[in-house]
Each structure stands twice: as structure tokens, then as C-alpha cells.
Amino acid sequence: MKQKRAFTIILSAIILLSAAGCSSKEENSKETSQSVSLSEESKEETEETSESEPADNQLTNELDNSLVSDDEIKSDLSVDDIDVLSDTIDADTETTIDELTAEYEELTSEINTYDKYKSNVDKIEAFYNKVCDTNASLCLRMREYALEYANLVMGLDESNSDKYDDIDEIYDSIYSGALDDAYYDIYSGLLDDMYDAYYNGILDDAFDDEPYSEVSDLHSDEYDMFSDARSTVYDDISDCRSDVYDFWSDLRSKLFDNNAEKAQKKIDNFQKDIEKLKNKSNWRSDQLWKSKNLIFHLLR
């Protein structure tokens, strides 16, 4: 009896242990299944997030990859870029003078008699002012071009000796190039033509037929307008030539001494002088293609 009871106890224990093992196995299986399911869901979410990355981020990444450093830009510069800037200066000067000349021709074609002159003195005065303002703006841009030349040359991957030679473009293209053109075509050209057309032309001839007192007043006023404009144009061109020459000479001197650091300081100071001039005189350039940014686009 005791043996049968002992056997029953042992058998019950075996059954309980077996049941416990099965239950544990099922729970482990469930946990594993849930873990695999969560892993797959996480993977799907990651793939969906990756596939739905905003276009803005992709564009930002592309732009970041396309950006170049200042050093890379400088290393890409060449003497050809200086030639482009030289062509830009020539085109600017020619266009400016041509526009003034065209306006002069239109004015003298419209106001071509004494009576028309009397009725349109304000237009004559306005044109003199336009000549002065346009010439002053051109002179300012010549300073800016000289500054751009210097920055281009200093950015070239070459020796200071070669830069010393390249900096001569400031003298050739601006000092003895564009500013000479402004002197001969505006100061000695256009304004002298105005003098011949009105002071020494229509008004001078009017003394024969019109009241002397009236003609004399107009004659005197015309000379004052002409003289003031001529003096202003001369002073602006002269000051600009002096500034450009000194800048060019100082740069050559520092590069000749193989001192690029002092040459750069001259450039920085010249830029400050230009900004002061702009602020002092309230300059405004009305031709956007002449700006530094567009010049750089041409160079690139």
C-alpha cells in the first residue's frame, strides 16, 4: 500500500513538472513572437521614414554639397577673369557715354531755336545736372572696379612678382583707359558740344534779332550752367584719377616688397574710403549689371 501511494505521489510530481515546463515554453514562444513582430514593425517604420524624407532636406543636402569655400573660389580665379572685368569696364564706359550722347542729340534736336530755348531753359539745366550726376556715378564705379581688380589679382594662385605685373591692369584699364575716355568724351566732348550748340550758337546768333537785355541774361545764365557743369565734371574725374593712381601705386609698392599682408591692408582701406564716399555723397548706381555680384557671376 505504501509503495502504491509513493508511486502515485511521484507520478503526480512528474505531471506537474511537465505541465509547468509546457507553460513556460508557451510563454517564451509568445514573447519571442511579439519581439519579432515589434522588430518587423520598427523596420517598416524606419523604411517608410527613409522613403518619405522631406524634399527640402534633400535640397538642403544638395546645396550644402555644392557650396565652395573662399579658398576654392580663389584657386579657380585666373588671368582670364581679369580680362572679363576689363571688358566689363570698357562696356560700362562706352554705354554711359553713348547714353549721354544720345540724350544730348535728342535735346539739341528738340530745342533748336531761340524761342524753344527760352521756353525750355529748365530742360537745359536738367541735362547739365544729368551729365554731372552720370559722370560722378561713373567715377565711383571706376573706384569699385579698381577694388575688384585688386581682389581678383590677390586671389590668383601665383607669386607676388606675378601679381605685381597683373596689378597694372588697374592703370591700363581704368586710369589711362576709362577715365581718359570720360575726360575726352564728356568733359572735352559733350560739354563743349553743349557750349557750341547754345552759348556760342543759338544764343550768340540771337543778339542780331532779339532784345539785347533778354538775350544777354540768357547768354550769361547759359555760360554759368556750362561752366559749373564743366568744373564739376573735371573735379570728379581728377579726384577719381588721383584715387585710382594712388591705390595702384601703393599696391605695386607692397607687392614689389613681397608683402602681401600690407597690400591687403591697402585694399581694405580703399574699400572703406569708397564706402565713406558713397555715404557722404549719397551715391546710387542705377545699372545693376555693373554691381560686384553680377561681375562675379560673369567671372564664374
Image (cartoon, rainbow, N blue to C red):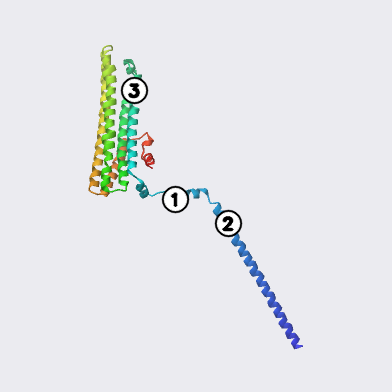
Residue 158 % position (x, y): 30, 48
Mark 3, other Cα within 10 Å: few <14 / some 14–19 / many ≥20: some
Q: Secondary structure at mark 3?
A: helix
**Residue 45: numbered disc:** 2
Of tags 2 and 1, which is closer to the observer?
Answer: 1
Q: Earlier in the sequence, mark 2 or mark 3?
A: 2
Q: Residue at x 33, y 24 (%)?
A: 104
Q: Amino acid at mark 2?
A: Glu
Q: Earlier in the sequence, mark 2 or mark 1?
A: 2
Q: Secondary structure at mark 2?
A: helix
Q: Amino acid at mark 3?
A: Glu
**Residue 65: numbered disc:** 1
Q: Amino acid at mark 1?
A: Asn
Residue 211 % position (x, y): 27, 12
In contact (CB < 8 Å): disc 2 and disc 3: no
Q: Look at the picture and state if 43 lies above or below 171.
A: below
Residue 232 appears anywhere in the view: no
Answer left or right for 1 relative to 207: right
C-alpha span from label 2 to label 3: 75 Å
Q: Which residue is mark 3?
A: 105
C-alpha span from label 2 to label 1: 28 Å
